[in-house]
Amino acid sequence: MGELILCKKPIAAVPYYIEDASVNIYSIEELCYYIAHNVYLINTEFACVELCNWIGREVGKEEEKALTQVLDNEQPLHVFVNTILNFSDYLPGDEIRNVVEIIASFENKSPVECAKIRADRLLDKDKIVDAIYEYENILDRLEKDEMSKEFMGDVWHNLGVCYSRLFFFNEASVCYEYAYQLNRKKISLESMLCAYRCMKDDDGFNMQLAKYFVPDDLASKIKKIVTDTSTSKDVVDFSTRLDKMKSDFYEEKSYQKQLGLIIERWKNEYNGLCNI
């Protein structure tokens, strides 16, 4: 899981597999760690007989009985999670209360609203690809569920944020435009215009200015934001580094190899961010 976890209770001979995260759990402490660090991903499917049975085999029959009783009494998810977290002293009491309160807050929201909160959390944690998958699933469900235009627009906007962070500005501009048409929020309009400027699509930028009657002061503001960002020290330094690489590795194959090493390092860093 990327961290050293002190396990005071026995390590399971057979792990419990959590399909949503594609991760094996080998101890009650690891299970508590998973819950605490993925609280926004915990849903009603987490509370299942299979998990109770695994805890009975690997932790103890008393613990299994306590969890099974929660299921039999049809108690809410936060009670099930609270029961598990109290099986060990991995988390202090205040952290357990915080986790339980977050999960309890989901229980007063619709499934689609819960899904958006989870997707937003993935985006906050830079798990961009996972967030895109969640937002797209939400949009598929919105065709069947009655939600406000503002909610749908906010989903489209955050999907645009995902694509922007991957430098897919064309896809981002489309998402932002859908968002603005639904939520009419200024931030969605500004983000769409920024995406066009990042693509260096002057014709598209000017067309959108006219289409949405964007005032001159806002257009100037967008141009300044993108210009300032593109000429920031980090961007300029990286551009200078690329130019130096081109001169140091004048052969195309050598240059491409060095560029590939940089991209591979970025990929590894990104994968590290996405690890549980």
Image (cartoon, rainbow, N blue to C red):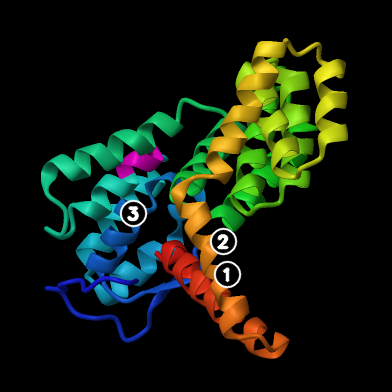
> For the point 66% across and 82% down, which residue is it?
256
For the residue pair 35 and 68, the one nearer the viewer reads as 35
Please report the bounds of the magenta region as a residue range.
75-79
Type of amino acid at the residue the image marks with label 3:
His
Dot 2 crowding, Cα within 10 Å, few <14, some 14–19, many 20+: few
Type of amino acid at the residue the image marks with label 1:
Leu
Q: Is residue 121 left or right of residue 13?
A: right
Cα–Cα span, label 2 and label 1: 5 Å
Dot 1 crowding, Cα within 10 Å, few <14, some 14–19, many 20+: some
Q: Quadrant of residue 205?
A: top right
Figure quadrant of the C terminus: bottom left
Type of amino acid at the residue the image marks with label 2:
Ser
The secondary structure that dominates the magenta segment is helix
Q: Is residue 211 left or right of residue 57?
A: right
For the residue pair 101 and 261, the one nearer the viewer reads as 261
Q: How many marks?
A: 3
Q: Can residue 42 be seen by looking at this rendering?
A: no
Task: Give SS at disc 2.
Answer: helix
**In the rendered image, the vertical position of residue 259 relative to residue 197, given as above or below:** below
Labelled disc at residue 242: 1
Inspect the magenta stretch and tell me whether residue 160 lies in it. Answer: no
Residue that carries the numbered disc 2 in the rendered image: 239
Closest to the camera, between mark 3 and mark 2, is 2
Residue that carries the numbered disc 3 in the rendered image: 37
Along the polypeptide, which appears first: circle 3 or circle 1? 3
**In the rendered image, the vertical position of residue 60 relative to residue 123, given as above or below:** below
Check whether the beta carbons of the residues at disc 2 and disc 1 lie within 8 A of each other. yes
Cα–Cα span, label 3 and label 1: 38 Å
**In the rendered image, the vertical position of residue 224 relative to residue 52, given as above or below:** above
